[in-house]
Amino acid sequence: MKRAKTILGIESSCDETSVALLEVLKDDFKVVFHETASQIAIHERYGGVVPEVAARTHVAEIVSLLERSDVFGSTTPDAIAVTRGPGLATALRVGIEAARTLAYAWDVPIIGVNHLEGHLASVWLDEENRTKWDYPILALLVSGGHTELVVINAPGKYKVLGRTRDDAAGEAFDKTAKIMGLGYPGGPAISKRALDGDPNAFDFPRPMIHDPSFDFSFSGLKTAVRQTWEKLPDKEKKNPQMINHLAASLQAAIVESLIAKTKLAMAKIKPKAVTVVGGVSANAELRAALQHAVAEFSSSTFFLSPPMGVQTDNAAMIAAAGAWKLAAKKTDDWKKLEAKPEWDL
Ligand code: KG4
Ligand code: ZN
């Protein structure tokens, strides 16, 4: 019988330093270590991620995370998977240089992973999802920097059907939260406020909802929220219920726009399974709306959601994508591995 392989995952593309150890035996994936040092508290005071601060904080965190994973003790991994891009160049380099050094010292393969493929692979961190994984799969990939509809035909075989023409869905949450003084990141703050608000209180636009393409656009929504906010009397800007209504109406507009295009894509692709990945998929309203849309589309199409906790950036998903690439023998040369800040799927 083949022995399980241990893959070390390293993620440092934005504001989370994350290290994971994944045990892989054929299609069986088991996370045996996973820790993420979030920089949210640091970037919060700037109202967004400051690249230089992010990179310096990765440097400060990465060695202690690696130490805690015990890779310098009893478990030398069989391979190292590291995020190569897309992301902030200086932040990516911290993870990549650590991975290159370890690959050289341990003489093990290194695998440069596309962060977006990592989000897709996050679905595999749940055992039941792996049994329901049947092609073609339609993925709605929604993060702070990306909003895409992707057809998965096999690991490594992706077709981007459509993407945002301006802001990403996560950016729409982040920028409007900033306008309303709700801090960074905006998604969790807005979804919390939306729980007590009326989604019909404000009629925000659903951009491109009647457009036949699979593309999205969210910058108009941001403008609409800004204009509404600026017209509000100061007293109302401080009224918590008013903010709850704004948050609920905004969330409804984003969710509806995302679902409309995913429905269009389902009708075209006729997928066997549909999934939603990336930080914005932590949004319970979005997940529920998509689950409902999939059930309406076909009772034989699975709705797959990554396990809780791996929607936002993390190293377990990078190790999972690394396992796919290792199985396909797609490894890299540590001498040549460089960051690819603008890397598409
Ligand atoms: O995937 P991710 O962690 O980082 C990138 O690759 O960009 O996504 C971060 C994004 C942020 O824009 C954040 O506001 C959003 O995910 N997000 C949410 C929620 N939690 C995080 N958006 C909506 N609802 C949430 N609960
Ligand atoms: Zn991400």
Image (cartoon, grey):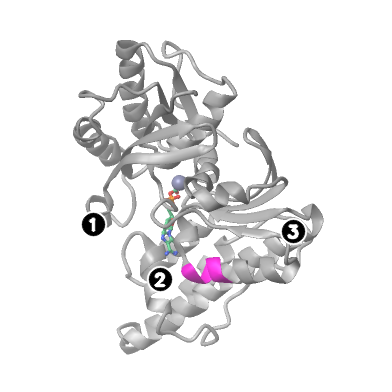
Q: Nearer the viewer, residue 288 or 199?
A: 288
Q: Which residues are magenta?
A: 284-288
Q: Nearer the viewer, residue 313 or 229?
A: 313
Residue 86 visible in the shown view: no
User: What's the residue type where badge 3 is placed?
Assistant: Met
Q: Tell me where residue 15 sits by quadrant.
A: top left
Residue 190, numbered circle: 2
CB of mark 2 near ligand 1 (< 8 Å): yes
Q: Are marks 3 and 2 in contact (CB under 8 Å)?
A: no
Label 1 vs 3, first from the N-terminus: 1
In the displayed structure image, the side of residue 268 where residue 192 appears, left or right: left
Name above or below for residue 218 compared with residue 312.
below
Q: Nearer the viewer, residue 180 or 286?
A: 286
The residue that appears at 23% across and 54% down in the rendered structure is: 41
Q: Are marks 2 and 1 in contact (CB under 8 Å)?
A: no
Task: Give neighbour class at mark 3: few <14, some 14-19, many 20+ (Cα, 10 Å).
Answer: many
Task: Give neighbour class at mark 2: few <14, some 14-19, many 20+ (Cα, 10 Å).
Answer: many
Q: Secondary structure at mark 3?
A: helix
Name above or below for residue 240 compared with residue 177.
below
Q: Quadrant of the C terminus?
A: top right
Question: Regarding ligand 1, which quadrant of the image does it lie in?
Answer: bottom left
Q: Gap in Å between the C-alphas at discs 1 and 3?
A: 41 Å
Q: Which residue is mark 1?
A: 45
User: What's the residue type where badge 2 is placed?
Assistant: Ile
Q: Gap in Å between the C-alphas at discs 3 and 2?
A: 28 Å
The residue that appears at 68% across and 69% down in the rendered structure is: 295
Q: Which residue is mark 3?
A: 266
